[in-house]
Image (cartoon, helix red, strand yellow):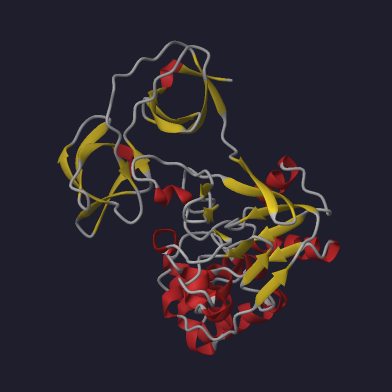
């Protein structure tokens, strides 16, 4: 995001229009972020076939380690069927620009030094066996540009929106205007307030870009949000961005202007079973989420530390492993809830991770903590 905001928008917006008469099924996926294996698993789970329409809402590269494979796979799907639509996201746009525009050569080094792991540039350097710290920025840019040329030729063909029957598909959002096609490119692929701002159209607008969990105040919930009042559907399950994430699919079963909305997802986490009944007292649940990660330590504990969340002024306990310091400030490293999970003997949970004597788990759609000794592998 830091370098994306410095990249000027220099390509034309492309809108696609598609009208389907009769019955159809449309599968919509967003923000795959180079997790091809997870994407293939999701397509199998929803029984995707070439008779279906498939819409990818951008940000299918970066974050993960299968960016090149992801592009190849999407190109293959589009060769096999003219019912596959791949839209432009902010990640595709920004990466294409910093590699191909000579004014942004220094951004590549900044990106490699400061922006996460994985991604298409790192894959290219690994394939070429190049140590980027040993080359001038411009030379590095030229080498990467040549190696990734076929990928960028594909990215430059991507449309920005798809209007299909009762639905408008776009990566981030639309400006609140009847002539939504005149929304700026920056709004279409990087708007952060679309769900809050809304729109003025009759159609449903389907977006990714921001993980759905960001829209929940007191719980971590990556499921698709279907807001009938706002006529907005948010589908980004946080893959590649959140440690607790899933890859979502919106399934539209339509017949002309009539439709039914279904959802599905994949979340590859190990399953555990409760060995005993676990009782918990009634509790107020607190959540830490982007962008409010800064906290103040009040009292350190053996397993949990009492903290005050700076932005909300709420006080609650955070697992010690989730705290880190930077520039003399303390932060929670990811989305977090302080909920203790109650279980019945034999009940199943998904295991997010083990932190000391505690396990971070998902029970149904509830996320929280339970002592690991109460669980066994299922």
**12 above or below 269?**
below
**119 above or below 246?**
below
Residue at screen point 54% across, 51% down: 239
**Place of residue 201 in the rendered image (x, y in percent of width and height, measured from the top left):** 53, 66
**176 above or below 38?**
below
Residue 326 makes an appearance in the image: yes
Residue at screen point 61% across, 42% down: 265
User: Can you say which quadrant of the picture contains the C terminus?
Assistant: top right
Q: Residue lying furthest bottom in this view?
A: 103
Residue 155 makes an appearance in the image: no
**Place of residue 175 in the rendered image (x, y in percent of width and height, measured from the top left):** 47, 72
User: Can you say which quadrant of the picture contains the N terminus?
Assistant: bottom left
Residue at screen point 52% across, 56% down: 231
Please state if 307 lies on the left or on the right of 342 as rendered.
Answer: left
State the image quarter where residue 168 is shown.
Answer: bottom right
| Count of number-bearing discs | 0
State the image quarter where residue 338 is shown.
Answer: top left
**181 above or below 216?**
below
Q: Residue lying furthest left in this view?
A: 298
Please state if 155 lies on the left or on the right of 103 as rendered.
Answer: right
Residue at screen point 20% across, 43% down: 314
Could you say which is closer to the camera, residue 207 or residue 76?
Answer: 207
**Place of residue 32 in the rendered image (x, y in percent of width and height, measured from the top left):** 60, 55
**Place of residue 104 in the rendered image (x, y in percent of width and height, measured from the top left):** 49, 84
């Amino acid at each position: 995001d830091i370098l994306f905001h410095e990249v000027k928008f220099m390509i034309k917006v492309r809108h696609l229009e598609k009208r389907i008469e009769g019955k159809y099924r449309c599968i919509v996926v967003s923000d795959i972020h180079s997790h091809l294996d997870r994407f293939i698993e999701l397509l199998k789970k929803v029984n995707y076939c070439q008779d279906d329409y498939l819409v990818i809402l951008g940000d299918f590269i970066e974050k993960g380690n299968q960016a090149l494979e992801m592009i190849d796979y999407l190109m293959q799907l589009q060769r096999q069927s003219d019912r596959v639509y791949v839209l432009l996201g902010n990640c595709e746009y920004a990466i294409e620009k910093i590699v191909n525009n000579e004014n942004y050569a220094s951004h590549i080094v900044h990106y490699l030094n400061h922006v996460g792991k994985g991604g298409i540039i790192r894959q290219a350097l690994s394939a070429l066996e190049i140590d980027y710290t040993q080359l001038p920025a411009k030379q590095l840019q030229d080498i990467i540009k040549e190696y990734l040329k076929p990928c960028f030729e594909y990215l430059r063909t991507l449309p920005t929106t798809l209007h299909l029957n009762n639905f408008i598909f776009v990566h981030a959002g639309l400006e609140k205007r009847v002539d939504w096609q005149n929304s700026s490119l920056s709004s279409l692929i990087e708007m952060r307030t679309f769900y809050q701002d809304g729109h003025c159209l009759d159609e449903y607008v389907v977006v990714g870009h921001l993980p759905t969990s960001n829209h929940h105040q007191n719980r971590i919930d990556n499921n698709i949000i279907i807001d009938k009042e706002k006529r907005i559907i948010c589908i980004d399950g946080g893959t590649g961005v959140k440690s607790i994430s899933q890859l979502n699919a919106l399934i539209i079963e339509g017949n002309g202007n009539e439709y039914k909305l279904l959802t599905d997802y994949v979340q590859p986490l190990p399953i555990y079973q409760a060995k005993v009944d676990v009782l918990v007292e009634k509790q107020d649940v607190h959540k830490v989420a982007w962008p409010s990660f800064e906290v103040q330590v009040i009292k350190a504990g053996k397993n949990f530390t009492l903290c005050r969340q700076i932005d909300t002024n709420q006080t609650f306990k955070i697992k010690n492993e989730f705290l880190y310091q930077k520039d003399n400030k303390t932060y929670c490293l990811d989305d977090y809830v302080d909920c203790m999970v109650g279980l019945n003997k034999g009940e199943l949970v998904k295991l997010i991770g083990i932190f000391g004597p505690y396990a971070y788990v998902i029970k149904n759609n509830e996320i929280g903590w339970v002592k690991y000794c109460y669980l066994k592998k299922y």
